Image (spheres, rainbow, N blue to C red):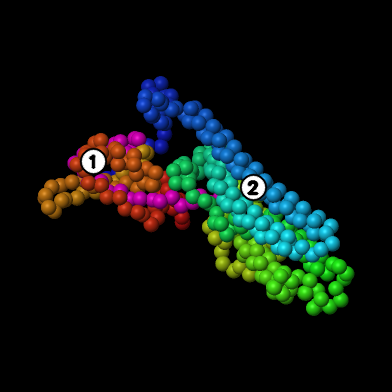
Amino acid sequence: MSTDFPTSPPESGDGSRVWEPIWRFRGYELGPEDFTHAMLELYRGEQQRSSVWRTRLDSTTYWAVITALVTLIYLFASPHHHYIVLVLTTLLIAVFLWIEARRYRYYELWSYRVRLLETDFFAAMLVPPFGPHAGWAESFAHALLMPEFPITMLEALGRRFRRNYMWVFLLLGLAWALKGYLHPIPATSWGEFASRFALGAIPGEAMIVAGLVFNGTLFAIGLATSGMRHASGEVLPKYGEFPILGELREALETREPAPGAESAVRPAARRRAQLLILVVTAKPQEIAARVLKEMRRGVTALHGKGMYTQQEREVLMVAVTVTEVAQLEQIVREEDPNAFVIVSPAQEILGRGFQPLGT
């Protein structure tokens, strides 16, 4: 039985370290220096992709601001009501908000990868123990192999609304009320004021209620999502965009802070699928040696007996992540094509190479 795995490169006869190739493909080998260079190029590529989507976000905001500005100029320069123009503009800007929220999710996808490299790779070079955060490579590989949006559409809508569109909708609502009050002369009663918002056969009171419900829904989404902090591509204030509400929540909070409360410092890595693999094989030593050397994963040997064949067998138990399954299966296939492999999901794996074992 063994759970040890190598932690440092072997030494040559003169005491110097002998580094083995990190990556091989069709005769090509990647050493430590080449690996660092490849990571730098990957960082530049992800940073450029993130910047492109950030530019797309700004473009959508420009569309909304220009559309609102042109509508307001036309509305107050015209001697007629033209409320239909204001209604259509409000709906169009809501579409812009939805488009920008969708783009923001893509931006967060690329930004998440950039932040993961910055916090768990580059920042780890500057402070003890001068090594990458545990599991950072698996987190990054998982993001590359199976990309997922880090934030929900609801959080994206709320964040973009609070950052930009809240002021646009406030300005449109104020302009709508001001136009109704002033044109053609200041209203002297509520009935006169409400009647000016009539749109065809729809009475003014109904239009006012519809406007309040529409804008109230948007503001409710912005308020309800103010506590969501999964976005990693922006500097998030401690209490979000509404400090008073954040301070009130903290004052009413009585339980201990959640483990992810430090997410403002470094983004919380998404949980990777962890698996437990059992290998029933006639060549346990060969397979275990390659797993220890090539995968740098611990292996535990369990003694078993096949009740049908009455043959003694060694059962190898290996804990891996989802991105390592293919490599382990390849090793078993090459060493013992007749082996029996069981892949089971693990609820949680604690210890070296996985999640830290808490006290």
Residue 324: image location, x then y, percent: 37, 43
Quarter of the image for residue 168 reads: bottom right
Q: Residues within 10 Å of mark 2 (few under 14, many from 20)?
A: some
N-terminal of the two: label 1 or label 2? 2
Q: Secondary structure at mark 1?
A: helix
Identify which amino acid the numbered label 2 is placed on: Leu
Total residue callouts:
2
Name the residue rendered at 33%, 50% in the picture. Answer: 276
Name the amino acid type tagged 1.
Pro
**Left or right of residue 304: residue 155:** right
Image disc number at residue 284: 1
Q: Is residue 50 left or right of residue 327?
A: right
Local crowd size for mark 1, using a 10 Å CA cut-off: few (<14), some (14–19), many (≥20)? some
The label shown at residue 115 is none
Instruction: Give the residue displayed 84% in from the left and 57% down from the top.
Output: 77
Residue with the mark numbered 2: 57
